[in-house]
Image (tube, rainbow, N blue to C red):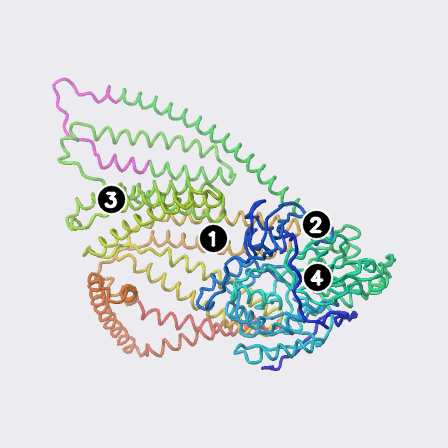
């Protein structure tokens, strides 16, 4: 052992007779190839696999015959070569004796492998590809319920994994499969541990093994002691059920996994010995999981030993090979005597989680005595390793009080059977718990269906009511329009009668066109505000809707009259003669372009939401986006052309609008072709390959158009665009925020449970926060430097749309959380935390909108470039942007193949370097001037920065101390934190004054 590891203890536990020596006298031997294998489609937790072969197909050993469905599922492979003779229900190893979908293969006796080979160097493979390779091998946990291994290995992205535990305890009586595996194949176990450690990067690896396996312990030491990994073999006292996942974690680390959580939530991952060997054989030899070690024991067995058995082998074949005496066999148990199940059908097959078959005689496995009344002795509570109240759970299950059983943590029961073993009344407690769990799951499923039906019914009623209201509104609108048209006719007739000039007179002067246009604009603005107020009142069910509707009708009439007056004035002869030449309305064109951009952004957000939820017509949304992109390009082009005609200074700009329109149209074609190709792949269409080639051609055309646009823009000697695309950076910030939230939750759980890993996890959280802060600072720099001359008004339409989307998410999450609370779901607490996060995001967006509106109203006239150049902070941001562009260009040049030249890129780099050096020089001069100004005021700017940084660190330290403090110390720490924050704010304010 490399370190001295303290062995802790867990509550309860028992010491039943081990009976392990029966099957350890002979080495592992190969079981014969069966004449027929039965492969259940669900040998794991999660969804059943989907067959990819048909009846009559010939398959080879190791060939994929059923594919995983969804995230929690596992592939199934043929364990023999032969012909698929049936895909039908067949008895499977289940306590109910149920049948399930199975794939039956008749062996041809050749035992031919498919072509297979392992990875030459798995360390060179990207992490995700290596995990996918293991997923394709169909590996699931081989010591418990069969949880897909790739899901556990993927936790490294979302959790901080401090400890990897290899479960070698094998605590249940009779079973010696892992014991013999450690004795004979310790090197394969080491290889599997190294692969898992490469993926998870744990700080510490612990192999937990009971002290009743001395030969296995020696074999592990011989294989693992020279490993460069930080690995310890920890020997624990023999006690059942020390092999339970949470019990072994408590034994080795002292950490208790909270109820309803998984070990990864406290920075720990567990893997079984058999699973590590399967990972090694898959990665190094390319062998999928088609066999496993099975212990055959019991007094009725002729040869009590361990066999390497093909998955799908019927129990009868294995019992025959072991020369089991059927006349002596009283019970056939799959698994151990504590947690196993009794079966009566010997045609049930071996699956991935089958580790033992016990052919017990009547003396060895006598009939269960009849149950007596509970005497409330409390022995079941004393031995429960999960620290539950078995007696109370028994009463709740017997009385069908399932809600009470759930609230007493029924689902924390691991069904180890310790309570039934010590019960003096011989009550089959575990069977009652299994019954209660099944009933609760059934009720939850029925409740989910009922909730879904209720939501659909309410949505239908809401839709019908909405359609009714809209129909009534359209009717009223038509009546208003008819009345307005009639009034307009009367006004026109009256106007012609009163303003017609006398015969022979000449009308002099023209109407005030500017005033009429202003009146029309004001009327339109009032009308829009009234429409928004009415829509808001109708949506929220406020009072006074009829008054708002009447006001809206009056404003509509006034707006129509103002528009008509302005139009009539434009068409008068005097006005026509007064206009020497028509002028383009730049403001209207700019508004049109802004409206087109807003519609495009809304459509893109709808498409993103549809991708996330899986609902909606994605193809239709993509087509709509392509159309809106074309309209946006056209609107931008019209505005730029008009602006260029009125402003000679922009006449030399390069017009890329037509090329951008071509790119938008080609992008729509690519999206449509990709959707059709994916549908063909999912349906197994033979045309999928041709469609893939077509998609590639379209992507090549799109890439050519994009390259052409890039070249045009890079060759244009014009100023940088006024806006910067920050979407990629914002997406990266969102991902990093998610990682910070998950890491903080894991750290808080570790603090609550008193985990020794809490300090390390806190350091990890701080690192993630630093990365998030760096990304946020970069986004702030880009946004603040994106516009040299900000407009006097702020377009908040996109932000308002984002707030509306976020409000919808908050409402949806709240409804789901309320339903979970009403149904007593254990996920309600997590859902509540999610609702709070969404509300915080909504509040942030609302604050941002308020700030934007306030700043837009109070913003002074745009600064000139000379004024902007005086801002030290903005100059620093400009230097940062220049440096980023220069590094990006240099990286592109470095990625060129050896000997390949790119004169245009080299020229760009030279130009960027010159601009960067000039900006850096200006910034250095301005910074020196600021430092001199600070020195004249008696302030050392360098020392001020150091003091501000130390003050911020003191605030962080005080916040951490407060989070860990006991109740009686919190008031003192809160006062210290307040003082530290005040000092930090003061220093930061002074520093900010010299950074403007």
The magenta segment: 495-523
Q: Is mark 3 on a helix, strand or loop?
A: helix
Residue 658 shows which numbered tag?
3
**Between discs 1 and 3, the one toward the N terminus:** 3
**Between discs 1 and 4, the one toward the N terminus:** 4
Depth order, front residue of 218/422: 218
Q: Are marks 3 and 4 in contact (CB under 8 Å)?
A: no
Q: Are marks 4 and 2 in contact (CB under 8 Å)?
A: no
- Residue 654 vertical placement versus 388 (above, below): above
Real-space Cα distance between discs 1 and 4? Answer: 41 Å
Question: Which residue has dot 1 on it?
Answer: 842
Depth order, front residue of 606/204: 204
Residue 91 shows which numbered tag?
2
x then y, percent, for residue 906: 21, 64
Crowd around label 2: few <14 · some 14–19 · many ≥20 (10 Å): some
**Between discs 1 and 2, the one toward the N terminus:** 2
| Magenta-drawn stretch contains 94 | no
Real-space Cα distance between discs 3 and 4? Answer: 66 Å
**Between discs 4 and 2, the one toward the N terminus:** 2
Q: What element carries label 4?
A: loop
Q: Which callout, 3 or 4, points to the residue nearer the camera?
A: 4
**Residue at left 33%, top 50%?**
794
**Between discs 3 and 4, the one toward the N terminus:** 4
| Magenta-drawn stretch contains 511 | yes
- Residue 497 vertical placement versus 685 (above, below): above
Residue 414 shows which numbered tag?
4
Q: Point out the image quarter for the C terminus.
A: bottom left
């Amino acid at each position: 052992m490399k370190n001295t590891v303290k062995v802790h203890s867990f509550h309860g536990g028992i010491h039943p007779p081990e009976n392990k020596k029966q099957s350890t006298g002979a080495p592992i031997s190969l079981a014969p190839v069966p004449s027929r294998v039965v492969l259940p489609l669900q040998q794991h937790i999660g969804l059943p696999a989907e067959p990819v072969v048909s009846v009559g197909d010939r398959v080879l050993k190791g060939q994929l015959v059923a594919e995983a469905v969804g995230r929690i599922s596992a592939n199934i492979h043929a364990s023999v070569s032969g012909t698929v003779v049936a895909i039908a229900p067949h008895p499977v190893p289940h306590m109910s004796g149920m049948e399930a979908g199975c794939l039956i293969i008749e062996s041809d006796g050749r035992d031919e492998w498919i072509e297979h080979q392992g990875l030459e160097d798995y360390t060179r493979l990207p992490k995700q590809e290596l995990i996918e390779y293991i997923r394709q091998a169909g590996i699931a946990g081989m010591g418990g319920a069969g949880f897909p291994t790739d899901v556990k290995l993927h936790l490294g992205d979302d959790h901080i994994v401090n400890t990897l535990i290899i479960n070698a305890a094998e605590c249940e009586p009779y079973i010696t499969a892992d014991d013999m595996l450690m004795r004979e194949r310790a090197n394969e176990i080491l290889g599997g541990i190294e692969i898992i450690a490469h993926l998870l990067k744990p700080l510490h690896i612990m192999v937990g093994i009971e002290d009743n396996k001395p030969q296995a312990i020696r074999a592990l030491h011989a294989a693992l002691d020279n490993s460069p990994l930080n690995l310890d073999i920890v020997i624990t006292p023999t006690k059942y059920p020390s092999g339970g996942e949470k019990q072994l974690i408590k034994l080795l680390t002292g950490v208790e996994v909270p109820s309803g959580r998984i070990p990864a939530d406290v920075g720990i991952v567990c893997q079984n010995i058999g699973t590590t060997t399967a990972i090694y054989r898959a990665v190094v030899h390319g062998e999928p999981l088609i066999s496993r070690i099975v212990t055959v024991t019991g007094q009725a067995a002729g040869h009590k030993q361990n066999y390497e058995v093909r998955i799908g082998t019927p129990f009868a074949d294995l019992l025959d090979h072991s020369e089991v005496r059927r006349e002596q066999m009283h019970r056939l148990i799959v698994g151990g005597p504590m947690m196993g199940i009794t079966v009566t059908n010997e045609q049930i097959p071996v699956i991935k989680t089958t580790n033992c078959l016990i052919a017990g005689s009547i003396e060895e496995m006598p009939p269960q005595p009849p149950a007596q009344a509970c005497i409330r002795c409390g022995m079941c509570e004393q031995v429960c390793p999960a620290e539950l109240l078995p007696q109370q759970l028994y009463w709740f299950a017997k009385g069908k009080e399932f809600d009470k059983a759930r609230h007493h943590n029924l689902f924390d029961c691991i069904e180890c059977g310790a309570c039934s073993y010590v019960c003096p009344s011989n009550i089959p407690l575990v069977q009652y718990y299994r019954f209660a769990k099944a009933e609760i799951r059934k009720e939850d499923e029925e409740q989910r269906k009922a909730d879904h039906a209720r939501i659909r019914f309410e949505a239908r009623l809401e839709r019908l009511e909405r359609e009714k209201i809209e129909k009534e509104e359209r009717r009223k609108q038509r009546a208003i329009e008819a009345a307005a048209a009639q009034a307009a006719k009367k006004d026109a007739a009256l106007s012609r009668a009163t303003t017609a000039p006398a015969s022979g007179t000449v009308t002099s002067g023209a109407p005030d066109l500017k005033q009429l246009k202003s009146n029309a604009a004001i009327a339109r603005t009032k009308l829009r505000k009234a429409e928004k107020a009415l829509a808001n009142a109708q949506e929220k069910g406020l009072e006074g809707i009829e008054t708002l509707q009447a006001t809206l009708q009056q404003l509509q009439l006034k707006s129509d009259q103002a528009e008509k007056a302005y139009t009539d004035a434009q068409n008068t002869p005097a006005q026509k003669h007064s206009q020497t030449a028509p002028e383009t309305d730049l403001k209207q064109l700019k508004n049109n372009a802004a409206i087109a951009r807003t519609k495009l952004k809304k459509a893109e957000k709808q498409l993103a939401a549809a991708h996330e939820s899986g609902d909606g017509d994605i193809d239709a949304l993509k087509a709509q986006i392509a159309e809106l992109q074309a309209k946006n390009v056209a609107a931008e082009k019209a505005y730029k052309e008009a602006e260029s005609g009125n402003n000679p200074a922009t006449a030399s700009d390069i017009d890329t609008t037509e090329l951008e329109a071509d790119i938008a149209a080609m992008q729509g074609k690519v999206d449509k072709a990709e959707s059709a190709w994916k549908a063909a792949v999912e349906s197994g269409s033979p045309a999928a390959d041709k469609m893939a080639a077509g998609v590639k051609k379209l992507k090549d055309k799109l890439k050519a158009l994009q390259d052409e646009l890039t070249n045009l823009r890079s060759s244009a000697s014009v100023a940088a665009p006024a806006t910067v695309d920050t979407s990629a950076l914002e997406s990266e910030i969102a991902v990093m925020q998610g990682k910070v939230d998950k890491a903080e939750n894991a750290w808080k759980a570790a603090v609550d449970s008193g985990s020794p890993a809490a300090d390390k996890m806190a350091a990890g959280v701080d690192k993630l926060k630093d990365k998030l802060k760096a990304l946020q600072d970069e986004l702030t720099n880009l946004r603040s430097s994106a516009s040299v001359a900000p407009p006097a008004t702020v377009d908040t339409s996109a932000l308002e749309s984002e707030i509306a989307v976020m409000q919808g998410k908050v409402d949806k999450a709240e409804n789901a959380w309320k339903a979970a609370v009403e149904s007593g779901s254990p996920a309600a607490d997590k859902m509540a935390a999610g609702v709070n996060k969404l509300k915080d995001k909504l509040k942030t967006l609302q604050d941002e909108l308020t700030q934007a509106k306030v700043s837009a109203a109070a913003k002074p006239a745009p600064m000139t470039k000379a004024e902007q150049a005086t801002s030290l902070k903005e100059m620093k941001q400009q230097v940062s942007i220049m440096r980023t562009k220069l590094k990006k260009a240099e990286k592109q040049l470095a990625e060129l193949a050896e000997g390949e030249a790119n004169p245009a890129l080299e020229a760009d780099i030279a130009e960027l370097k010159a601009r960067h050096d000039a900006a850096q020089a200006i910034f250095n001069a301005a910074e020196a001037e600021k430092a001199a100004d600070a020195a004249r005021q008696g302030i050392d700017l360098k020392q001020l920065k150091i003091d501000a940084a130390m003050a911020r660190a003191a605030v962080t330290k005080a916040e951490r101390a407060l989070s860990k403090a006991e109740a009686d110390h919190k008031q003192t720490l809160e006062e210290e934190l307040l003082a530290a924050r005040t000092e930090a704010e003061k220093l930061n304010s002074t520093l900010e004054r010299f950074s403007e």
